[in-house]
C-alpha cells in the first residue's frame, strides 16, 4: 500500500478517536500526534525552502496556517488542513501516475543488455557495444541497438515504436531498429549505430525532456503564483492585525482565525497542480496514438493550427514506386511484364526493382544476353532470341518504333519487342489511404489552408493535389524553394495562428525548423528530420497529426476550465473568509475540493477517444 495512504488512514483514525474523547489534554495530544504523522513532510519542506530562498509556496502557507490554528486552540482544524491537503496530494500522485502510464510503454523499450560476439558471447550494457560488432538477439528479447541482420529470419513486434500490432517480417540484409522485440527465431545483427545515436535512445530522450518545455499557460501560472502568494500572505497579516485595532469590540483570536482561514484557501494548489497535469495528460494521450510531442508549448500551439504544409513523397504518398497498370499490345499483360522483367534483370534502378517486384517470379538471367543500357533512355536486351527495348519515349524515337503515347499520370515505361510496340507499364507512387482521412480531419479541425510542397514533377503533383482536394500545390521545388514558400505562407496566418509543416526527409529539415510546429513522419525516417521536428509520429499516418490537433484543443479547453473554476472559487471563499462567513473547514474543502475536481477534470483527456 502507498505510504502516504497509510499515513492518511492512521492520521484520520487518530482524529476520530480524539473527537470521541472528552478529556481535552488527551484529545489535544492525539491531534498533535495526528498532525505530526500527516504533516511533518510539509513542515520540513517549508523550512528547507525558506533556507533556499523559496519562502512563499503552498508548503509555507499550509505550515503557517496550521501552526497558527494550534496557537489559537483550533486543533481539529489544524489536523484537517494537513489531512485534506495530503488527500489532494494523493489524488495528484494518482493522476500523474495515470498520465505516466500512457508513456510507460515507451519507457519499456529501453534495453537492459546486449549479447555481443567477441571471443565468446558476452552479455554487456548496450552502450558498451561498438559499431560493426555482431550482436545476438534471441526470441522474446528486445533489439538493443540499430543494425542490419546478417543471419536469421523472424518477425518483430514494433508496437512500442510504431503502435502497429501486426508483426513485421525481417530477414538477412534488412535494417532493424532498437526497441523492437524479436518474436520467433535467433537473429544475428551487425550494429550500425552506437547506443547514444540509436532509435530507442533518441525516443527516450524526447519523452524525458518533453516536460522541460513549458507552455504559455504554465509559465503564466508560475509567474502568477510567484506574485500571488506574497500578496495573500500580506493581506492575511493585515487581516489579523488591523481590524482588532480599528473595529471596536473585535476579538483578536477571531480575526487571527479569519486570517489563517484566508491563508488556507489562498493556496494556489488547484492551479499549480492541475495546469501542468493537464498538459502532461495531453502529451500522454498523444503518446497513446504513437505521437511524441517534445513539449507542452508545442501541444498548446497545435490548438491554433491555421495552415498545414505537407511534403508529398512519404507523407501523403507511400514513397514506394509500384507498377500501377499494364497496357499490353499484341501480348498478354503477364507476358509483357515477363519480357520487361528479364530485360531489367541486371539493372539496379528503382524502376527496374518495381517491375521485377510486380513480376514476382524467379528470374534466370542466363537467358538474357547482350544487355545494353542506353543512358537517359532505357535498356536494350536479348531474351530467348527476341530483342527487347524498354524505356522512355526517347528510346522509342531513337529506334523508330511507332508507338501510342500515354497521357496517364506517373512514370510511363514503353516496351518494344522485335521492333514492334508491345505496350506500356505505368509506374507511380500511390496516395496513402490514410491521407484522405487526414485531410478530412484537418478540415473538421478548422485548418484554413492545406498546401503541398514537393520536388516532384508538375503533372504527378497536380494529380495528387486534385485527388486529395488540397488548397494549393507547389512542385519541382528544391529545399531552398520550400523554405521561401514556407516564409511566404507564414506571413498569411493570423497573429495567434500557427503553421505546421509535415515532412519525412533530410531535405525537409530546414522547413521543419522554420515552421511554428515541425512534424517528422515516422521515427523510422531521417535523423535530421527527427532532430529538427517538434512532433515525431512513430508511424507513417498523417491523420495522427490531425488527431493531435484534436487532443491539443481538448487539452486547452480543460486548462481554461480549470483556471476559471479555480480562480472563481478562490475569490468567493477568500471574500467569505475575510468577512468571517467561512470557517477553516470551509477553507479546507474549498482548497482541497477545487484541487481534486481540477485534477479529475485534467484526467479526462486520457479517457477521451479521438478519431
Image: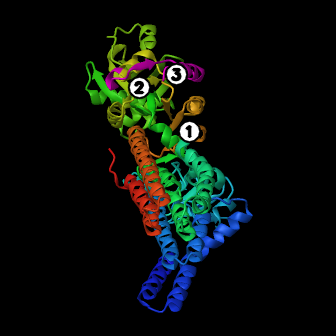
- Residue at (42, 56) in percent of width and height: 598
Image x and y of residue 165, in percent: 37, 54
Which is more N-terminal, label 1 or label 2?
A: 2
Circle 2 is placed at which residue position? 450
Circle 3 is placed at which residue position? 373
Residue 156 is left or right of residue 490, and the answer is left
Image x and y of residue 254, in percent: 52, 68
Up-down relation of residue 51 to residue 441 (above or below): below
**Crowding at mark 3 (Cα within 10 Å: few <14, some 14-19, many 20+):** some
Which is more N-terminal, label 1 or label 3?
A: 3
The verdict on residue 470 being magenta is yes
Q: Nearer the viewer, residue 448 or 333?
A: 448
* Residue 49 found in image quarter: bottom right
**Crowding at mark 2 (Cα within 10 Å: few <14, some 14-19, many 20+):** many
Q: Which residues are magenta?
A: 466-493
Which is more N-terminal, label 3 or label 2?
A: 3
Q: Nearer the viewer, mark 3 or mark 1?
A: 1
Task: Residue 154: tell me if it is visible.
Answer: no
* Residue 553 found in image quarter: top left
Up-down relation of residue 476 to residue 294 (above or below): above
- Residue at (47, 18) in percent of width and height: 475
- Residue at (68, 59) in percent of width and height: 54
Circle 1 is placed at which residue position? 533
Q: Disc 2 and disc 1: Cα gap in Å?
A: 19 Å
Q: Disc 2 and disc 3: Cα gap in Å?
A: 42 Å
Amino acid at each position: 500500500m502507498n505510504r502516504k495512504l497509510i499515513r492518511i488512514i492512521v492520521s484520520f483514525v487518530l482524529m476520530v478517536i480524539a473527537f470521541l474523547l472528552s478529556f481535552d489534554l488527551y484529545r489535544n495530544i492525539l491531534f498533535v500526534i495526528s498532525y505530526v504523522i500527516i504533516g511533518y513532510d510539509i513542515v520540513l519542506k517549508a523550512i528547507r525552502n525558506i533556507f533556499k530562498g523559496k519562502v512563499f509556496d503552498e508548503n509555507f502557507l499550509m505550515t503557517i496556517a496550521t501552526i497558527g490554528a494550534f496557537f489559537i486552540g483550533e486543533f481539529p482544524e489544524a489536523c484537517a488542513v494537513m489531512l485534506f491537503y495530503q488527500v489532494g496530494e494523493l489524488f495528484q500522485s494518482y493522476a500523474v501516475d495515470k498520465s505516466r502510464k500512457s508513456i510507460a510503454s515507451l519507457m519499456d523499450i529501453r534495453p537492459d543488455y546486449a549479447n555481443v560476439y567477441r571471443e565468446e558471447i558476452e552479455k554487456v550494457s548496450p552502450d558498451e557495444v561498438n559499431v560493426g560488432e555482431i550482436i545476438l538477439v534471441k526470441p522474446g528479447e528486445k533489439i538493443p541497438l540499430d543494425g542490419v541482420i546478417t543471419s536469421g529470419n523472424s518477425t518483430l513486434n514494433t508496437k512500442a515504436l510504431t503502435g502497429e500490432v501486426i508483426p513485421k517480417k525481417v530477414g538477412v540484409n534488412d535494417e532493424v531498429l532498437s526497441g523492437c522485440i524479436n518474436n520467433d527465431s535467433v537473429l544475428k545483427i551487425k550494429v550500425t549505430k552506437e547506443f547514444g545515436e540509436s532509435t530507442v535512445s533518441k525516443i527516450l530522450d524526447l519523452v524525458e525532456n518533453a516536460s522541460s518545455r513549458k507552455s504559455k499557460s504554465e509559465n503564466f501560472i508560475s509567474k502568477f503564483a510567484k506574485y500571488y502568494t506574497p500578496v495573500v500572505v500580506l493581506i492575511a497579516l493585515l487581516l489579523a492585525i488591523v481590524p482588532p485595532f480599528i473595529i471596536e469590540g473585535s476579538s483578536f483570536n477571531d480575526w487571527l482565525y479569519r486570517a489563517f482561514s484566508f491563508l488556507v484557501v489562498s493556496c494556489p494548489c488547484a492551479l499549480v497542480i492541475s495546469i501542468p497535469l493537464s498538459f502532461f495528460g495531453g502529451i500522454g494521450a498523444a503518446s497513446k496514438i504513437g505521437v511524441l510531442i517534445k513539449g507542452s508549448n508545442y501541444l498548446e500551439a497545435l490548438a491554433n493550427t491555421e495552415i498545414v504544409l505537407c511534403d508529398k513523397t512519404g507523407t501523403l504518398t507511400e514513397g514506394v514506386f509500384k507498377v500501377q497498370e499494364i497496357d499490353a499490345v499484341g501480348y498478354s499483360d503477364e507476358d509483357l511484364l515477363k519480357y520487361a522483367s528479364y530485360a531489367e534483370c541486371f539493372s539496379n534502378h528503382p524502376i527496374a526493382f518495381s517491375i521485377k517486384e510486380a513480376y514476382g517470379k524467379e528470374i534466370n538471367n542466363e537467358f538474357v544476353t547482350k544487355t545494353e543500357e542506353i543512358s537517359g533512355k532505357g535498356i536494350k536486351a536479348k531474351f530467348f532470341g527476341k530483342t527487347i527495348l524498354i524505356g522512355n519515349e526517347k528510346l522509342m524515337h531513337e529506334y523508330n518504333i511507332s508507338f501510342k503515347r500515354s497521357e496517364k499520370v506517373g512514370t510511363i515505361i514503353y516496351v518494344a519487342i522485335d521492333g514492334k510496340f508491345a505496350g506500356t507499364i505505368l509506374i507511380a507512387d500511390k496516395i496513402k489511404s490514410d491521407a484522405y482521412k487526414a485531410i478530412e480531419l484537418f478540415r473538421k479541425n478548422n485548418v484554413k489552408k492545406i498546401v503541398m510542397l514537393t520536388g516532384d514533377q508538375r503533372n504527378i503533383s497536380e494529380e495528387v493535389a486534385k485527388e486529395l482536394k488540397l488548397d494549393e500545390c507547389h512542385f519541382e521545388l528544391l529545399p531552398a524553394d520550400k523554405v521561401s514558400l514556407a516564409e511566404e505562407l507564414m506571413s498569411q496566418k493570423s497573429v495567434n495562428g500557427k503553421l505546421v509543416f509535415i515532412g519525412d526527409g533530410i531535405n525537409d529539415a530546414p522547413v521543419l525548423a522554420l515552421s511554428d510546429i515541425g512534424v517528422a513522419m515516422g521515427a523510422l525516417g531521417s535523423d535530421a528530420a527527427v532532430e529538427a521536428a517538434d512532433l515525431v509520429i512513430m508511424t507513417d499516418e498523417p491523420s495522427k497529426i490531425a488527431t493531435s490537433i484534436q487532443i491539443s484543443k481538448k487539452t486547452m479547453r480543460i486548462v481554461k476550465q480549470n483556471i476559471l473554476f479555480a480562480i472563481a472559487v478562490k475569490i468567493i471563499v477568500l471574500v467569505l473568509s475575510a468577512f468571517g462567513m467561512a470557517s477553516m473547514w470551509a477553507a479546507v474543502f474549498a482548497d482541497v475540493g477545487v484541487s481534486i475536481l481540477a485534477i479529475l477534470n485534467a484526467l479526462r483527456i486520457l479517457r477521451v477517444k479521438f478519431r
